[in-house]
Amino acid sequence: MLPEYALLGKFSVKSDVFSFGVILLEIISGKKSNGFHQEDPSLTLIGHVWELWQEDRAMEIVDSTLKESYNSHEVLKCIHIALLCVQEDAVDRRTISAIIVMLDSEISLPCPKQPAFIFRTSCNSSPIWEGPSSVNEMSITETVAR
């Protein structure tokens, strides 16, 4: 989901670019962005790719079923472009026409900034809601629609 939609309920002219970046990462990794769980269940697919990118290990995200049947330079370029597509601020995302030029040529790509939805929650923290509860454990308030 787009950061601007998740936070403000608004779409931007670069909504398609963000979605393209997510789909590109899903294709490369062979994993869905929703429900992605690696060793760290609090890390999203975008977050996982970003961490690998920062550590110069981005190729580790490539789906193992591809078995070296790909050009590593092209895959790395696609990961780079995907990270440029999923920037948190829509202003930092390229237009879809610029993305097409990047995919089709050997131009120098700008460095991506930290993408959207890079967050961690403590595995030891309690869930936000576990069911009915009360501040004083004496009463339970139930919300009922009219």
Image: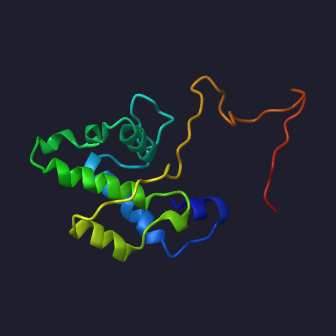
Asked whether, in this view, residue 66 is left or right of residue 88, the answer is left
Question: Seen from this angle, which residue lies furthest left?
Answer: 69
In the rendered view, tell whether residue 4 sits above or below residue 139. Answer: below
Question: Seen from this angle, which residue lies furthest top?
Answer: 124
Q: Where is residue 66, by image quadrant?
A: top left
Q: Where is residue 5, by image quadrant?
A: bottom right
Between 15 and 72, the one lying in front of the other is 72
Task: State the residue at coordinates (31%, 41%).
Answer: 58
Task: State the residue at coordinates (61%, 70%).
Answer: 10
Q: Pinpoint residue 114: horizontal percent, then vertical percent.
A: 50, 49
Between 125 and 55, the one lying in front of the other is 55
Between 110 and 8, the one lying in front of the other is 110
In the rendered view, tell whether residue 51 sits above or below residue 40. Answer: below
Q: Pinpoint residue 124: horizontal percent, then vertical percent.
A: 61, 22
In the rendered view, tell whether residue 119 sits above or below residue 28. Answer: above
Between 128 and 76, the one lying in front of the other is 76
Task: State the residue at coordinates (33%, 53%).
Answer: 80
Q: Quadrant of the C terminus?
A: bottom right
Q: Pinpoint residue 12: horizontal percent, then vertical percent.
A: 55, 73
Q: How many labels were placed on the picture?
A: 0
In the rendered view, tell whether residue 139 sits above or below residue 13. Answer: above
Colouring method of the image: rainbow
Asked whether, in this view, residue 99 is left or right of residue 139, the answer is left
Q: Pinpoint residue 39: horizontal percent, then vertical percent.
A: 40, 28
Asked whether, in this view, residue 80 is left or right of residue 6, the answer is left
Question: Seen from this angle, which residue lies furthest front?
Answer: 108
